[in-house]
Image (cartoon, rainbow, N blue to C red):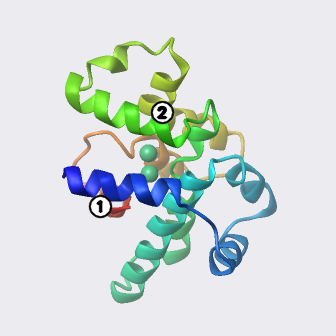
Amino acid sequence: MILYRIKQFIWAITANLNLQDKEFIKYYLTDYELKLFNKLPVYEKKHSIKVAYDIKKFCEKEKKYDKNFLIKLALLHDIGKICNALNVVQKCIMVILDKITAKKLSKFTKIKIIDTYYNHGLKGYYILKKYDYSYKFLYLVKNHHNNIEGNKELNILKIFDSKN
Ligand SMILES: [Fe+2]
Ligand SMILES: [Fe+2]
């Protein structure tokens, strides 16, 4: 776990979008979605793109899922992080504090970075709710860190989210 966290930190500080990434997001996102997406810090963009690449591969094997829907979901699942975005160091501190305090910090939502860290699913839901998304899409964004069982799409998102 610690090794994995170190790897994640290195990914984050060295994150950069290459040409393939840029073409990928342009292909799957509309103009206004791209505008929203570009407000994310680069390490969060890279994270969402990696989740989307994994989901694309998964859907190409498991043909029963709506690939375009899940790729767009992967790219936008953390869009709530555009509100008071955390830099890489703040994010690492939050990951460590979250572990040490067993999520007790989540009460302190008046502190903006804590609020973003714990509530970005809900924030993303409110951002996207102004546009024309299905109930299902909004539900998945809102609940991607919540313990809800039996939702296949949510499980897929959670698996590839935690891998990246
Ligand atoms: Fe998230
Ligand atoms: Fe995520």
Residue tagged 2: 90
- Say which quarter of the image contains residue 22: bottom right
Q: In this view, does 45 lie above or below 36?
A: below
Where does residue 17 sit, x and y in percent of width and height?
A: 64, 68
Where does residue 33 sit, x and y in percent of width and height?
A: 72, 56
Is 106 or 136 nearer to us in this picture? 106
Which corner quadrant holds the C terminus?
Answer: bottom left
The label shown at residue 3 is none
Between circles 2 and 1, the one closer to the viewer is 2
Instruction: Name the N-terminal-most of marks 2 and 1.
Output: 2
Q: What element carries label 1?
A: helix
Q: Which residue is drawn at 39% across and 42% down?
A: 143
Q: Is mark 2 on a helix, strand or loop?
A: helix
Where does residue 122 sit, x and y in percent of width and height?
A: 50, 33
Left/right placement of residue 64 relative to residue 72 reads left
Q: In this view, does 123 lie above or below 3?
A: above
Left/right placement of residue 49 relative to residue 131 reads left
Check disc 2: other Cα within 10 Å, few if <14, some if 14-19, many if 20+. Answer: some
- What is the residue that sits farthest to the right in this orientation? 31
Q: Which residue is drawn at 41% across and 82% down?
A: 57
Whether the residue carrying mark 1 lies under 8 Å from ligand 2 is answered with no
Check disc 1: other Cα within 10 Å, few if <14, some if 14-19, many if 20+. Answer: some
- Say which quarter of the image contains residue 156: bottom left
Which amino acid type is marked by label 2?
Gln
Q: Is residue 76 visible?
A: no
Q: Which residue is drawn at 36% across and 14% down?
A: 107
Is 75 or 66 nearer to us in this picture? 75
Residue tagged 1: 159
Q: What is the number of callouts on the image?
A: 2
Q: Which residue is drawn at 37% across and 56% down?
A: 8
Where does residue 88 sit, x and y in percent of width and height?
A: 51, 43
Which amino acid type is marked by label 1?
Ile
